[in-house]
Image (tube, rainbow, N blue to C red):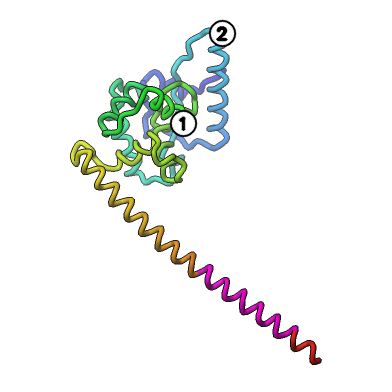
Amino acid sequence: MSISSNASSASRNGSVDDSTTTTTTDSSELTHILNRRQEIIDSQEAGIEVPRTFKVVNVYTEFHEFSRKQIKDYQKTFNTYDTARDGFLDLNELKYMMEKLGAPQTHLGLKKMIAEVDEDHDGKISFREFLLIYRKAQAGELDSESGLNQLARLTEIDVEQVGVSGAKNFFEAKIEQQLRTNKFHDEIRQEQEDRRREEEERAQRRQQFQQRAAIFQ
């Protein structure tokens, strides 16, 4: 199994230098994931511990839906709870994070959170996989009561500054705003549906009129 020199260098340094990152194509991304999974499978079958590897990723390019400021903010949050400073959030660090956010999880709940974004199956969350949480949240792919959805929501504000009750009020206001927005869109859709129905009825009346007129011709 081959590993690029860039990934080996990053592994020795223990981090990825943002200034040296290069654009990763979709094909190379898929190739890396498949190679990594095969490496893990081969090693596990041989009873060998899988070594940690790093991959050079330009998150600003891959996660184009987020601004640079958003990604830097997410990085700051990630680093806050990456207490081992190894570039990953393991189960204990995730447990600590959720407790600090006021949304503690069970052991199984934490494992489920990791598994949902753990694309390389190493049992931890890398920063890239951390960003996947926010991508899924933005796309509405997370269950509203799931641990990952709580993480995404609660890290939008500083819970330590406003407190859990303050965070609760913040999200209640946000939900209310979202409901108002949804109601607005529902009214637009209803108007469009009424307009479509009226056009269909007019077309049907014209057809009936033409059919009656044809009788006298």
Residue 69 location, quadrant? top left
Residue drawn at the location 42% of the way across and 21% of the way down: 9
Q: Classify mark 2: helix, strand or loop.
A: loop
Horizontal arrangement in the rendering, residue 92 relative to residue 45 (left or right):
left
Q: Which residue lies furthest to the top in this view?
A: 47
The quadrant the C terminus occupies is: bottom right
Q: Which residue lies furthest to the bottom in this view?
A: 216
From the viewer's side, name the closer residue of 208 and 186: 208
From the viewer's side, name the closer residue of 80 and 22: 80
From the viewer's side, name the closer residue of 73 and 27: 73
| Magenta part of the chain | 192-211
Q: Does the magenta stretch include residue 18?
A: no
Instruction: Give above or below for 6 relative to 24.
Output: above
Residue 211 location, quadrant? bottom right
Residue drawn at the location 27% of the way across and 34% of the way down: 101
Q: Classify mark 1: helix, strand or loop.
A: helix
What is the magenta segment's predominant secondary structure?
helix
Q: Mark 1 or mark 2, which is nearer the start of the sequence? A: 2
Residue ID for mark 2? 46
Return the x and y of residue 204 as percentages of the image width and height.
66, 77
Number of other residues with Cα within 10 Å of mark 1, as a class: few under 14, some 14 to 19, many 20 or more: some
Q: Residue 138: which disc?
A: none
The quadrant the N terminus occupies is: top right
Identity of the amino acid at label 2?
Answer: Ala
Return the x and y of residue 30 as percentages of the image width and height.
56, 32
Q: Does the magenta stretch include residue 194?
A: yes
Return the x and y of residue 132 as percentages of the image width and height.
43, 36
Residue drawn at the location 39% of the way across and 33% of the way down: 130
Residue ID for mark 1? 116
Residue drawn at the location 44% of the way across and 18% of the way down: 52
Identity of the amino acid at label 1?
Answer: Glu
Return the x and y of residue 88 as percentages of the image width and height.
37, 25
